[in-house]
Image (spheres, rainbow, N blue to C red):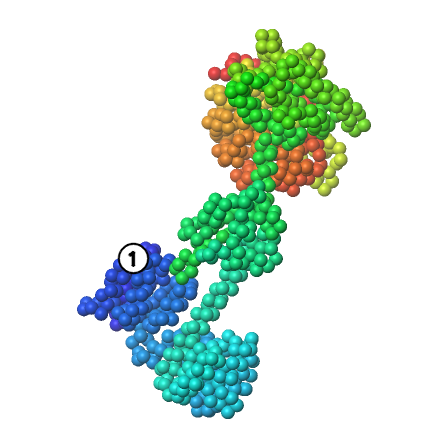
Amino acid sequence: MVANSHNVLLIEPSATQRYVLEQTLRAAGHSVAIAETLEVAVGLLANAGQPGFVTEAVVLDWPAQTLPAASDLLLLLGSEVCCHIPVLVLCPEPDIALNNWCSERSNRTVLEWRNRSRVGATLETLIAVSSLPSLAQAVIAPEPDSIRVLLVDDSPSVRSHYRKLLIGHGYLVEVAASVADGFRKAQQEHFDIAIVDYFMPDGNGDVLCRRLHNDPGTRDISVAMFTGSYVEKVIKDALDAGATECMFKNEVDALFLTRVAAMSRSIRSRSFIEAERQRLQSILHSVGDGVYGVDSRGLVCFVNPAALRILGYKHEREVLGRSPVECFHGTDADGQPVARRACRLQRAYGRSAILRGWETVFSNCIGVQVPVECTVYPMYLDGGLEGSVVAFRDISERKSFEEKLRWQASHDPLTELFNRRYFEDALDKEFERLTRSSEISALLYIDLDRFKYINDTASHDAGDRLLVHVGERLRARLRSTDTLARLGGDEFVVLLRNVDNSFLHSVADAFRATVGQVCFHYEGKSYSVQGSVGVATFDGSCASPGDILARADMACHVAKTAGGNQVHLYVEANDYRSEMGADLGWSARLREAIDQDLFELHFHPIVPIAAIDMENLPDESGVIWSQIASDPAKVKICFEVLLRLRAPDSSLIMPGAFLPSAERFHLMPEIDLWVLHRAIRALGAFQRVWKAVVFAINLAGQTLIKPDLVGRIRALLAQYEVAPGSIAFEITETSAIANLPAAQRVINELAALGCQFSLDDFGTGFSSFAHLKHLNVDCVKIDGLFVRGMTKDPTDHAMVISMNDIAHFLGQTTVAEYVESGEILKLLSECGVDQVQGFFIARPIPEQLACPGEPVGDTLLLDTEEFE
């Protein structure tokens, strides 16, 4: 053992910190005993003074919490039994409790954790100083390096002696010979302590003491009266004048230094408390959340500026000392009084438990309800529970955004009518109600006639305006008990509750007439509008809400087939056969189209925003594509492959007319196979014209679940010698989530070949963001409903930004659909979207025009054998 080795007791509950300290102390040559808990330390130190007790010093990690064991340990270390043992305290930063404890105990020093490497040297110095005579111990106790002392005495010898004594112990000292000289110097410089002789020629010391306390610039100086003898009048005058200490010139220097040290500790403690108060006050004033305190009486004891701003008060005196229930949270969201016992916040005040994230409303100073989110913390003072601290924030914007999202979930963003989801829920509830009632309700299914003609000839914008206008006219005809919704496209439904069958046809015809009265004008042209109405009545005996909607749909189909602009009431026997016949007719036509190659492909360009001159956008649609197509070797282009059906009269039939029947008769896998053959074969011709081209090919949900899909695609890629990286398969969010395991399998296997994947119509399904991370897609296509509404609805704008940011965070590129104006294009560019698609860029292009100068091939003969 080295010469300066000492027996040290290390009290450290943390295993990691205990290891570091033990190694440091042993490296310094000390013998270390370990107390892993505060209880063990109390047990060991209780034997101090007994034979065999060998501890010469203690190293203590200052307890962070006021626990019973910590209190016992600190009391024991300050007792007569252990007061002779030097104690080195380690802490992150000295606090008030530590300063108070240190002020009452000698033989201790404090070391911050960041300086823990100096534990060995500091402990050695502490042990050495502790073994010196009592005077030295008194000298080191106050740590007076920054204490400034003003010594006022008319005796030159007294001034000289005590000046040297104080300077020798680290104090900064200035002297004065009279009351006037002392007051002048106190005003010119900062002092912590003034030691004032009582008897001086120009006035007694209590005069200077009063002058110091009455002057705002010197009132914080701690004054000690200095006299040669104990005289009660002197002591009384000194204390009455505001002195905090009396010192006597006939006392030994050690006692004088001890008194100065005690004053220094008090000053340091007071300075620390004031600095801490200012720091906390600064934090309290700078935080954006409102904060207020409630004392043990249930009254507001402090409040920060943010709380005053949220509540609309100008001064804290308007709130302090008042009950928060009576002041700002005594009513509910409807403005009705809330009983104290029923108020969750009131019950949380003064409790030791924390109440987190409680949403309620506060009333501001003029009675306006402000939605807030509160967290209530217990407020401890000197180890005792003295009330609560409440932090709250104004969540008005969040609530408004949530309300917009709820509205959007139940409404059609274009017409602002209820959407399909809401209507189906309403139909379910009405069906359930009728099972307990004898009433009859009806469902009107309204489909606009010739809407497609207006939409295609006048533009999508014209079609949108027409739908809004029709929705407004239909809404004007509703009773308060009726429900109107837009199912999608040009289809509207009306739920009529508690109807009279004898008047039902006339009521339905009135809705038809309302549509017919719409006179629509767009860009100087007038368009007549008509509608077909299908009606289905139902009561509690019907099979299901889905059957009710299907019957009304069938009745509407019958009305349109009969020439349109009329009302048809569903008759089960006749209409069911009619609908089945229509579906069977489509089934035969689709089978014929597959066998005789009657489908056609159109190609809709998807253009990188980086390839568009955003500073010089054209006013007309299609110009951007003309500019890009003029130099096809310059830009990498993606074409979405779209399907059309050629009718016997040579007109084109859009997929919306035949794909629902194709899905009902499970023909989608064969149709997708036809598209795959034709598109992959055509890709070679496109690649000879365009510098770099990718085809985006849609896959239906029925196709995804076919086990041999990947094998067929692999064979086609090999047959036409097409690089897998030039194919991007598009799957809709709804179909992907409905067949998530199958979608994941197909995506992973084709991605392994090098194919790309896009998630189409992102944002329309449930839990979109949650599912996105489970699908290994390269690109996300933001649903056009959000894109089209960006210029009018801040919520749609925010949703596009959010979807784009999350996709980029996951390493995916983004495509925005339905780009129909330059204004939308500029917003998408600001959002950081990567690619755009829509009529403002280009309309879908027939194969011959999309790839000029290249043969498109002869009739495609397919092996139409069904998927396994």
- Residue 305 at x, y percent in the picture: 57, 57
Q: Residue at x 51, y 84 (%)?
A: 207
Q: Is residue 664 left or right of residue 414?
A: left
Is 518 placed above or below 371 here? Answer: above
* Neighbourhood count class around disc 1 (C-alpha, 10 Å): few under 14, some 14–19, many 20 upward: some
Q: Residue at x 46, y 46 (%)?
A: 341
Question: What is the quadrant of residue 428 in the picture?
Answer: top right
Is 622 placed above or below 355 here? Answer: above
Q: Is residue 539 left or right of residue 619?
A: left
Q: Residue at x 50, y 56 (%)?
A: 299
Q: Nearer the viewer, residue 22 or 868?
A: 22
Res 454 seen here: yes
SS state under label 1: loop
Question: Is the N terminus in the top left, top right, bottom left or bottom right quadrant?
Answer: bottom left
Residue tagged by mark 1?
A: 37
Amino acid type, label 1: Thr
- Residue 195 at x, y percent in the picture: 46, 82
